[in-house]
Amino acid sequence: MTRSRLLFVALATALLAVTACGGASDTTGGSSADEGSKSLSLVAYSTPQVVYDEIVPEFQKTGAGEGVGFKSSYGGSGEQSRAVEAGLKADVVAFSLAPDVERLVEAGLVGADWAKGPHDGFVSTSVVTFAVRKGNPKNIRTWADLLKPGVSVVTPNPFSSGGAKWNLLAAYGAASDGGSDDKAGLDFLRKLITRHVKVQDKSAREALQTFTSGTGDVLLAYENEAITAQKKGQEIDYVTPDDTIKIENPIAVTEKASPAAKEFLAFVLSQTGQEKFADWGYRPVNQKVFEEHKSKFSEPANLFTIRDLGGWDKVNDTMFDPEKGSVAKIEEAAGVSTAK
């Protein structure tokens, strides 16, 4: 085990101890795990909390969910995945990106066949968009507009937040013509991060809170985050650029999960569960539900995927490796922590 790995385990264990003692955390719950004879631990990335807060009580009304209590934890996708790896109890994990599930596969906590289920293991999709101030006073329409003098951008830290990786990959893909011009893509990211990104919070939810509190002109975000903010009465607009990336959010049951976990997963993927995602601006993986809600979603002219950029293995190695990745070096030059 490397020194960095040992240090991470020690820090993660300490974090779990603080959380258990009532320290600051993103833990919340639809209902207490003590309310029934059965309980499930849901560990998820930050933004879909509003969705699961509605899905959980609906599941509990079903025969499969009767008497099932929940303990739910929300935070940055990467941090949540590492916490489960370090010992945080989880029956169901719902992350921002597939590598955060694969980390748990390598640790023996999630089955290697997790992506062979319905919808390739994904629970929802989205696209990267620009949340802007009401009326879009700085007329932000394109990626190039983000580099205009005086434009301040908010996006989370890609070394704690999965959403931040999607944001930067959308920018990179658009500037590099789908990855064909690596130099152009990295040049754009360098200018964006070092000159225009002023705040990099730990999670997408925190970044949204920072933006709605008045910081920045533009928030790089999932389309669903912008829709959720509007639904909650926030005075923002959003613009989806013509060139952006398709976000794919995975969900999986852990190897030692309670039997009720599979029933919960099936409910999340059912029409009822997927309707809740659609209500909060996520693109349902259930095609029937998606078609019913299609009018609320933008239609980018050029929508590319992580596979178009070479896949997660390549991207994480060449761009997000903390020691050698191109994005890591850009972030370090900007004074941002790349520690995992």
Image: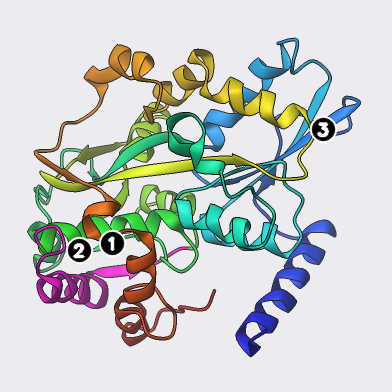
- In the picture of the structure, the residue carrying the numbered disc 2 is 172
**Residue 304 position within the rendered picture, expressed as x and y whole percent measured from the top left:** 19, 47
Q: Is residue 76 visible?
A: no
Q: Give the spatial CA distance, label 3 vs label 2.
A: 42 Å
Above or below for 289 versus 120: above
Furthest residue toward bottom: 3
Q: Magenta part of the protein: which range?
A: 177-201
Q: Give the spatial CA distance, label 3 vs label 1.
A: 37 Å
For the image, the number of numbered tags is: 3
N-term-proximal mark, 3 vs 2: 3
- Residue at (85%, 60%) from the top-left corner? 21
Residue 194 on the magenta span: yes
- In the picture of the structure, the residue carrying the numbered disc 3 is 39
Which of the 4 quarters of the picture holds residue 131? top left
Q: Give the spatial CA distance, label 1 vs label 2.
A: 6 Å
Is 114 left, or right, of 58 in this rendering? left
Residue 110 on the magenta span: no
Q: Look at the numbered discs 1 and 2 and tell me whether their residues touch, using CB distance below 8 Å.
A: yes
**Residue 101 position within the rendered picture, expressed as x and y whole percent measured from the top left:** 55, 52
Is 32 left, or right, of 147 in this rendering? right
- Residue at (68%, 23%) from the top-left corner? 263
Mark 3: amino acid: Ser
Above or below for 172 versus 326: above
- In the picture of the structure, the residue carrying the numbered disc 1 is 168
**Residue 236 position within the rendered picture, expressed as x and y whole percent measured from the top left:** 28, 39
Mark 1: amino acid: Leu
Q: Is residue 262 visible?
A: yes
Label 2 residue SS: helix
Mark 2: amino acid: Tyr
- Residue at (47%, 21%) from the top-left corner? 274
